Structures are given as structure tokens and as C-alpha cells.
Image (spheres, rainbow, N blue to C red):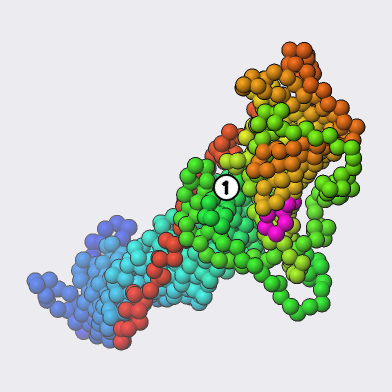
Amino acid sequence: MKRLRRYLLLLLYLSGCLMLPAQAPEGRKVVHIQHADAIRRILQEDKYLNRLTGNVRLMHNGTLMTCDSADVYSNNSFKASGHVVVVKDNTKLYGETLDYDGNTNTAKVRGKIVRLEDEKAVLRTFNLDFNTKENIGYFYGGGTLADTANVLESARGYYYSGLKVARFEEEVEMHNKEYQIRSDSLHYNTDTETSVFLGPTSIWHKEGYLFCENGWYDRPNDYFHFSKKAYVLSEKQEMWADSIFYDRLQGKSDLYGNIQILDTTRSLLAFGNEAHLVDETRDVVLTRLPSAAYYETDEEGKSDTLFIRGDTLHFATVKNPVYYAKDSISTDSTSVITAPVDTTTVQNDTIKFIERKIFPLPLPLANAAAIPAPFPLPKKNPAIVASDTLPTPITDSLLQSAPSDTLATIPAADSLQLQAVNDTTATIDSVFQYLHVFRGVKFFRNDGQGACDSLVYHVNDTLAEMYYNPVLWSSKNQITSDKIIFIGKNGQMDRIDFLDNAFAISQSDSTHFDQVKGRNMHALFRDNEVYLIDVLNNVQTIFYMVEDSVITDINLGESSNMQINVHERKMTRIKYIENQKISIHPLDQVTKAQERLKGFNWREDDRPKDRYDVCERTVIPSRRTEAASLPLPEFPITKKIDAVKL
């Protein structure tokens, strides 16, 4: 009986020794041995250790560690080998060896492949240190994580077991069935499948390319937020902004701060500080100092750009009910436009694009009346007739008696023309496209400028309408009316209608102005050059006559209608039609009031002086070529780990 009592006391003593250490620092837990098939006390380098073999189970910080064998030291540490498993809550860590320090709570797991698993993800690496108190794993030398949808790898990183968050750093690559991603630093939540980008990040998908230096990605909802140098590239567009929210499932994007959108389908650059897009290009609204630039290149390679601004720019695309109602299996025939997709530079107020690619664009509908216009289209004026059917009598006023620059520089078609597309009667468009510009509208081009309160451009019919105090300037000329309408045909300007209270003014010198006034004016074009101007109903004119560069006389005229012939942007003949009254007076015999027609309003102060009066933005060069040259992720770490034979 005494022998049995001594044996039990010896077991209790040995058990106390194995709790290690006897004087553990206050608040620090010692490693607890739950089980071993055999225990031997061994002297090694003048120190004793306990060697455990067979189904070894040790506990520390609520973490269970199992292995085939372990050497337990007196300093609250041990080394284990053979089928090492570390279990903490729902996290399991597998390896071949384990070096554990209970004082720092660090488990260094090694092996051909070290594997960390939780309910939703598996992390594989060559070296992993796991803090059993903080539930944090640190891997280096390369690691790869896989869950039900994603594979991620990096040179090093952390796994926060309690938070289900993996932090990847250096050479980060990620892929799923929708995206491939490369980043400097990325955090990934295995529960929510949300990624957070904390460095330069490139993202590829079947529709294009994305870049940012900060942001996040919600994979289940396919929702992105990009900030800091945010950039989105697709076949038709490039977008830059300080911040971009992109809902891919809904096809919506919200952009904020320093926005630039390059839309190759519209030959357009758009700017602003806030933008909302639906289905990439179907519906775009820009606000907060928005502006746009329509660029074009003629057959000779000459480029020019129309800059436009307003309080709000709205690019809209709506379905054509006629197209979707028709009983036909035929598809839209398409034409192509040369669309710039590469390097962008600004020279002499002109945006130039180098290296072009062809993109298809639906042909426009010829019948303007079929367009569900936001404003009523003008009715055709029956008073507009061909020159050879004008009523008589006609009084000619040849311009050799008038100054050569009187209304001389007629606005060229290309100074006022928006992007035109060839007309056709052979197709029906599936959609209609519009540009709406609201409040405070101004536009600038080197050879023509304009202003109004509201502007609508019907892309399909190449028809633009200016409303509420519209005005056009070209060289020394100004034309105003209640409404101005541009009409294109076959890819060129066909006519400009100045409807109601039309008034043309040309500056002769600082105080004298040639003037033509009528109810309506209609400028007709041939080969993008004006050749005929009809002035209709209650026409009044004032022309100054010059001799030796000195104004000597004033020509006052009235008639029911007027026709002006133009050649090379200069008037060659003026025809007063019906009820004409013309008188010439020495300049010193007329009053100042007689030198101004009623309604005279010289609006030079409203005129944009250069493109920076309309658009102050600096154009960001295209990144399309750069993005195309970037190598896709190759996942070398994942491939290396997959190749290891266990």
C-alpha cells in the first residue's frame, strides 16, 4: 500500500514537471500535455526535456496541437514532428514539423506543404507562423489561398482566423471565373468574398480592364469601388476619376472628381466632377462643371475639336419602337467610323488622336419625324423656295459698293457641325441617341463659337437644336434668333435654320456694325460650305460703305425677303425681294439711333475666347496601348505549390 502511494506521488510530480514551467510569468499560460502513449525524460546539452511519442496532444491558449512525437522543454516550448495538426476554433493547420514557443504564443509550422483550413478556404504555403492567442497566421516564401470562387496568391501575407480575413502582400495575383487581378497589396474576407485593394491594382475581365490604387470588390454582388487614379477601359470607352463605383450586375457606374470619359462610339471626350452611367454608354449624365469635346478628322487628316459645356450634359440612348415592333429577322446593317483609341494630345486648341481602330456604329434613321424628340421639331417653312422660283421684282445689290468683309466670313459648316453620320433609307435604327446640354451652354471651335440656355443634338438624324437666347459667332459675325437648328445630310452640314427674330451682325470697326434682320434665316450648304442664305419676312439691313479704308456712307434697306449668294465664305450678291426700299446716306447725316436696328444686341462679352473658356480640363492621354501590353497574371506560386508531390 505504501509502495502504491509513493508511485502515485511520483506520477503527480512528473505531471507537475510536464506543465512547464513551474514559475511561469504571471498571466502567461503554460503548455498542457493532454496525452502521449509514452513519456521519457532525456538529458540534452545539460538540460532535461520530456520526449513524448505516440498520439501526442498538447493544449495552449485553447489551441489543440497533435503530432506523432514532441520534445517538451522547461522554458514553455516544444518541438513536434510527424502529422502535425494545430486546431483553433474552426481553423486547422497541417504540417510536418512544429516549433512552438508558449511565451510568444507562436507556432512555426513547416513541411513540404503547410495547409491552413477553415470552413470556406484553404491556404497552402511552405512556411507558416501561427499566433495561437491572436489567431493570426503569417506566411512567407509564397502562399496560395482558394475558396469556392477565388484563387489568390502572394509572396507573403497574413491570415486572421477569427475575422476570416487574409492579407496578401507583394506579387499578389487573384482570379475567379469573371476576373483576373494583380495588386501590390490585397485583403480578402473568406466569409463575404470581399477584396480590398491597398496598392496599384490591375483587373482584367472579358469586357475590359480596370485600375486603381485603392478600393474594394464585392464578388457576390459584383460591385466595385475604385479610388486614387481610378481607371476603366472597355472596347468603346476609357474612364478616369478620383472615385468610381461600378455595379456590374446592374450595369451602372457612378464617378466622382476629375472625371474624363473617352467614348469612341460618339467621337467624344466628356469631363466633369460627377457622372452617372447606365449600361456603359446608353445613358450618361455629367454634372458639376461638365464639358465635352467632339473631335473629328477629315479625309486630309486635318483635325479639329468642338468643345461644349453646360450645367448638365446628358447623353441618352433610347430604343426605337419601330425597330422592335417590326416583324423581321434581319439585323441592323452597320456602317463604320474611324474612331481614335490611342494617344491623345492637345495642340492649338485641337485634340489629336493617333493610331485608330474601326468600330461599328448603327446607321441613322433618315426620317426625323420618327424620332421621339424631347422638343418638337420645326415645321418646314413654305416660304423657303429655290432661287429660280423666287417672286419678282428683284433688286440686286452687288457687293463692289460694300466693304469686302461685310458679313464676309460666313460660318463654315465644319465650324458648327457636330458629329455627323451618313444618312440612309435602307435601315431602321434599333436605338436613338441624343446629347442634351442644359443651362449656361457655350461651345468653342477655332472657326466658330456659340451660346444658349439649352441644346439638343439628335445623333441619328444629325440634327441639333439651340434654345433660349441662342447665338453663333464666326470671325467678326454674330447671328441670333429665338431658336437655331442645324440639319445634316449624308455626313455633311445641309442647312442651318435661324427661326424667329433672326439677326445677323458683322463688326465693321469698333463702333460700326453691318446688320441683317428678318423673321427667319436659312443658311444652305454644299460640300460643308454655305452657298446661299435666305432671309424671310420683314427684312431690314444696314451696310456701311468704305472708300480707302474709311467709312463714308451707310446703306439702309428693307424688303419682304432677301437672298444672299456666298462663295468661299464671302457674299457675292444680295437680292432684295418684294417691297424693297433702299437708301444711301452720308454717314455724317444719320443719327446714332439710325445706325442700330431694333433688337440690336452685340454679345461679344458672352463669346468664349478660346477652348479654356469652355473646357479648362487637361486631357489625359489614352492608356489603351499601355493596358493591352500588360502581362496577365500567371500564378507562378500556385503552380509551384501544385507541383509538389506529397
What is the span of residues highlighted in magenta in the rendered image?
A: 486-494
Q: Is residue 603 visible?
A: no
Name the quadrant containing residue 140: bottom left
Q: Where is residue 420 in the image (x, y as percent from the top left)?
A: 67, 56
Q: Where is residue 271 in the image (x, y as percent from the top left)?
A: 57, 47
> Mark 1 = which residue?
305
| Residue 488 within the segment the image draws in magenta | yes
Question: Disc 1 on helix, strand or loop?
Answer: strand
Residue at 77% over, 36% down: 574
Name the quadrant containing residue 606: top right
Q: Which of 580 and 311 is in front in this view?
A: 580
Q: In this view, does 280 lie above or below 576?
A: below
| Residue 343 within the segment the image draws in magenta | no
Residue at 61% over, 66% down: 336
Chief secondary structure of the magenta portion: strand
In the picture, which quadrant includes the N terminus? bottom left
Name the quadrant containing residue 132: bottom left
- Residue type, mark 1 in image: Thr
Residue at 31% over, 87% down: 646
